[in-house]
Amino acid sequence: MGLGGCILLIGIGAILTFAVDWHVQGMNIHVAGLVLMAVGIIGTAAYVSIFKRRRLQAPPPAATVVEEDRRYY
């Protein structure tokens, strides 16, 4: 799941938690929204930590080109 998916989960969870007043028998919509927000936040934290770890690694050293000018007289 990418960063966009995590942000989408947080948004949908916030809508279900704070902006909806539906009543569904057998399920609490507000708790489902909280679960979606928690999953989105955990996913965002995992994505950022992996991205940060990849970014901190040093790039491979560039190949050095050695040119010799040999002149035989």
Image (cartoon, rainbow, N blue to C red):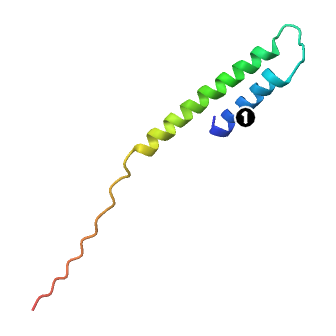
- Closer-to-camera residue (68/50): 50
Indicate left or right for 68 with 11 as reference.
Answer: left
The residue that disc 1 covers is 8
- Closer-to-camera residue (14/35): 14
Q: Is residue 14 above or below residue 68?
A: above
At x 65%, y 22%, the residue is 38
Count the marks. Answer: 1
* SS for dot 1: helix
- Closer-to-camera residue (2/28): 28
**Seen from this angle, which residue lies furthest bottom?**
73
Indicate left or right for 67 with 34 as reference.
Answer: left
At x 71%, y 23%, the residue is 36
Say which quarter of the image contains residue 47. Answer: top right
> How far across and down, in percent of the image, does residue 48 sit?
54, 36
Q: Which quadrant is home to the N terminus?
A: top right
Q: Is residue 23 above or below residue 20?
A: above
At x 84%, y 25%, the residue is 19
> How far across and down, in percent of the image, does residue 21 sit?
89, 18
Indicate left or right for 44 with 49 as reference.
Answer: right
Q: Amino acid at mark 1?
A: Leu
**Seen from this angle, which residue lies furthest top?**
26
At x 82%, y 10%, the residue is 27
